[in-house]
Image (spheres, rainbow, N blue to C red):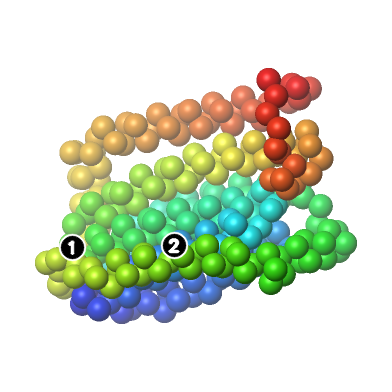
Amino acid sequence: MSGAAFVTLIAASSGLFAIGLFGLLLRRTVILQLVSLELMLAAGGFAFVVAGARHGGAEGQGMFVLVLTVAAAEAAVALVLFVRLRALADSADSDAFDRLRG
Amino acid sequence: MTGWAALPFAGAALAAAALAVTRANAVHAVLWMLAALLALAGAFLALGAPFAGGLQILVQAGAIVVLFAFAVTVLDLSAEAVARERARIGWREAAPAGVAALAVLAPLTVAAVSLDGGAGGDVGPIGPAAVGRLLFGPWMLAVELASLLLLAALIAARHLGRRGEARR
C-alpha cells in the first residue's frame, strides 16, 4: 500500500469516527446513540485493519477481533439496559434517564 | 494490495454512516448502519484482510445488527413519532454537534496526514492462519480476557433481561 493510500484510509476512518460522534451528540433516542457508538467502534477497528495491511502483520486484524469483542459485549448489555429502561420510564430518550435511585 | 481498491468502500461507508445518524426513522437508521458495516467489510476484503472481512459480516453486520433489530421493536414508530423526531434534528441541534465533531476530526486528520506510516509497501493478503497463530500464540491472554468479557456480558444481559416485575 502506498503511503498516500494509507493516509487517505486513516483519514477516512477518522471521518467515520467523527460522524459517529456527531450522531451521538445530535440524537437523543438511546438506540440511535447506540448506532452512533457502534459506528465509532467500527471506525477504530477499520484503522487497525488499515495499519495492519500497511505493515504486513497480523496484529492489525488481531486487534480488530478484540475491538469486535468489545463492540459485541457493549451492544448486548446496552440494548438490554435500553429495553428495561424503556419499560420503566416510558420514554426512549436518554434525557428521561437522569435520576439514579437504589 | 494497492490500498486504493479499498477507497470506494470506505467512501460508501462514510456516506451510509452519515445517512444512518441523520434518519428520523430508527429502522432506516439501523439499515443504513448495516450498509455502512457491510461497506467496511468490503474495504477489509479489498485490503487483503479476509478474516477481518468475514468477521465483520458475521458478527458486526450479522449478530450485532440483529440485536438492534430486536431492540428497535420497542420504539414508537408511528408517523407522528417520526415527525416529532425529525423536528428534533434540525440545524439548531445539528450545528453544535457538528462543531464538536469537527473539533475532534481536525486533530485526527492532522495526525493522519503527518503519518509517514513507517516501513510499508506491497504485502500480500494476510489470511486467517496468520491471525490464528497470533491470537492463540502470543496473544492468548488477550483472547482469554475477551472470553471473560463476553461471559460477563452474557450473564449481565441474562440478569437484566429476565422477566418479572422491574425493581425500583
Who's the residue at 43% across and 74% down the image? Answer: B9
> Is A2 rendered above or below residue A33?
below
Callout 1: residue from which chain? A
Q: Secondary structure at mark 2?
A: helix
> Is B156 rendered above or below residue B129?
above
Q: Quadrant of residue A11?
A: bottom left
Q: Secondary structure at mark 1?
A: helix
Q: Residue B28 location, x and y as percent?
A: 68, 65
> Is B147 rendered above or below residue B90?
above
Who's the residue at 27% across and 55% down the image? Answer: A60
Determine the residue located farthest toward the right in the rendered image: B80
Quadrant of the snapshot with the N terminus of chain A: bottom left
Q: Residue B147 location, x and y as percent?
A: 39, 33
Residue carrying label 1: A55
Q: Quadrant of residue A57?
A: bottom left
Q: Is residue A54 left or right of residue B87?
A: left
- Hey, what amino acid is under mark 1? His
Residue carrying label 2: B104
Q: Can residue B58 be seen?
A: no
